[in-house]
Image (cartoon, helix red, strand yellow):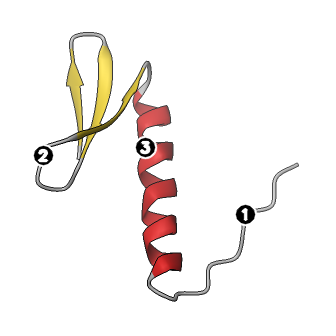
């Protein structure tokens, strides 16, 4: 869950009890959230290929 607090964007756990990250932009908070979701999926045994850059 992403919320704007003042000038920062905060990434919280699903239940909203803990802060997972503080970011200057919404895009960077969303990027961290996506990375966490990919990590969870891999830990659950899903095969997710790495995104190619460049």
At 82% from the left and 52% from the top, the residue drawn is 53
Residue 19 location in percent, x, y? 25, 36
Q: Secondary structure at mark 3?
A: helix
Q: Nearer the viewer, mark 2 or mark 3?
A: 2
Front residue of this view, candidates 54 and 35: 35
Numbered circle sitting on residue 16: 2
Q: Secondary structure at mark 2?
A: loop
Q: Is residue 9 above or below residue 6?
A: below
Instruction: Name the residue carrying label 1.
Output: 51
Q: How many marks?
A: 3
Give the class, few, some or many, for how many residues have Cα within 10 Å of label 1's Cα (few <14, many ≥20): few
Residue 28 location in percent, x, y? 49, 34
Q: CA distance from mark 1 to mark 3?
A: 16 Å
* Labels 2 and 1: the sequence-earlier one: 2
Numbered circle sitting on residue 29: none
At 46% from the left and 77% from the top, the residue drawn is 41
Residue 23 location in percent, x, y? 41, 25
Q: CA distance from mark 2 to mark 3?
A: 16 Å
Q: Secondary structure at mark 1?
A: loop
* Labels 2 and 3: the sequence-earlier one: 2
Instruction: Name the residue carrying label 3.
Output: 30
Residue 29 figure quarter = top left
Q: Is residue 22 left or right of residue 39?
A: left
Give the class, few, some or many, for how many residues have Cα within 10 Å of label 2's Cα (few <14, many ≥20): few
């Amino acid at each position: 869950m992403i919320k704007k607090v003042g000038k920062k964007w905060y990434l919280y756990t699903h239940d909203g009890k803990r802060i997972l990250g503080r970011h200057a932009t919404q895009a960077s908070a969303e990027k961290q959230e996506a990375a966490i979701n990919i990590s969870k999926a891999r830990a659950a045994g899903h095969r997710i290929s790495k995104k190619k850059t460049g």
